[in-house]
Image (cartoon, rainbow, N blue to C red):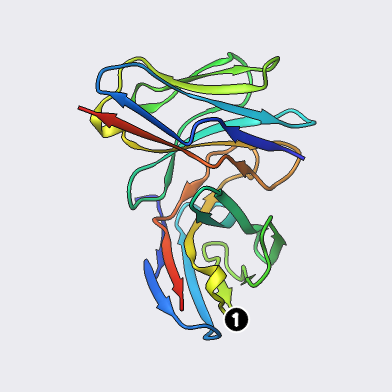
């Protein structure tokens, strides 16, 4: 089944404790991205990747890191999480960035205390 | 720069009634337009998209949208809604940037 998976689905952590949210897709898509969803703000893109070893900042990259060492994986790293990073996070992939449908993962709900 | 405005944050409607969810965009270049739906506790999935050609686009679950370039709008419509259509709906635009812009979402609430 074609899908985007994220882990964990739920995470509660404390300020400053490094964490990684994994994302994997099995559709051989070149383009992957991370979003955060906050009430009343819609989705905002954090980082995106056009292909292996190619990443770039989205609209809200501060406090986040990403890497793309393999085509299928695109982990999101919070090196020192803060409470304002409490949010719902989505990973997405698509064959191309502009005109193609984006396929979203199920989401990761992160709470930073 | 591009932007998307979803004019209604919440739209309540009775089952079997028609519904329209409004979306306006701005962009200095040609755009691609999308509507996504998010059911509770799920990720987003594509309803329909406009890339080029016919301005009336049909999607899944009986939804359709019309691209109106002069009014910079891409409103989503369904002639008769069902309880199962209760969800959050997002309009999105991509243009010259690799960063798509999403609207803030419209919560469609279908009452029996």
Q: Residue A66's image quarter?
A: bottom right
Identified at 57% across, 62% down, the residue is A71
Towards the viewer: A36 or A71: A36
Label 1 packing within 10 angstroms: few (<14), some (14-19), many (20+): some
| Relative image position of residue A87 (x, y in whole percent) | 49, 63
Identified at 55% across, 69% down, the residue is A85
Task: Please name the residue that numbered disc 1 is placed on.
Answer: A79
| Relative image position of residue B79 (x, y in whole percent) | 35, 14
Please say if A13 is above or below B90. Answer: below
What SS does tag 1 mark?
Answer: loop
Task: Specify whether B72 is left or right of B60.
Answer: right
| Relative image position of residue A12 (x, y in whole percent) | 40, 76
Identified at 60% across, 30% down, the residue is B33
| Relative image position of residue B84 (x, y in whole percent) | 26, 33
Towards the viewer: A89 or A24: A89
Task: Specify whether A69 is left or right of A26.
Answer: right
Name the residue furthest right: B28
Can you see residue A31?
no
């Amino acid at each position: 089944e074609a899908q985007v998976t994220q882990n964990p689905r739920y995470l509660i952590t404390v300020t400053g404790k490094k964490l990684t949210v994994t994302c994997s897709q099995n559709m051989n898509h070149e383009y992957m991205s991370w979003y955060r969803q906050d009430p009343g703000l819609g989705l905002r893109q954090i980082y995106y990747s056009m292909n292996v070893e190619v990443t770039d900042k989205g609209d809200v990259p501060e406090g986040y890191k990403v890497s793309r060492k393999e085509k299928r994986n695109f982990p999101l790293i919070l090196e020192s999480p803060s409470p304002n990073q409490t949010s719902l996070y989505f990973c997405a992939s698509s064959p191309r960035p502009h005109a193609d449908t984006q396929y979203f993962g199920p989401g990761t709900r992160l709470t930073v205390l | 720069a591009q932007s998307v405005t979803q004019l209604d944050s919440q739209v309540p409607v009775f089952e079997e009634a028609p519904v329209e969810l409004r979306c306006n965009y701005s962009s200095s270049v040609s755009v691609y337009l999308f509507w996504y739906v998010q059911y509770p506790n799920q990720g987003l999935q594509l309803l329909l998209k406009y890339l080029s050609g016919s301005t009336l686009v049909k999607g899944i679950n009986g939804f359709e949208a019309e691209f109106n370039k002069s009014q910079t709008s891409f409103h989503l419509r369904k002639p008769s809604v069902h309880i199962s259509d209760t969800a959050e709906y997002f309009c999105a635009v991509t243009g010259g940037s690799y960063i798509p812009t999403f609207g803030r979402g419209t919560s469609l609430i279908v009452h029996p």
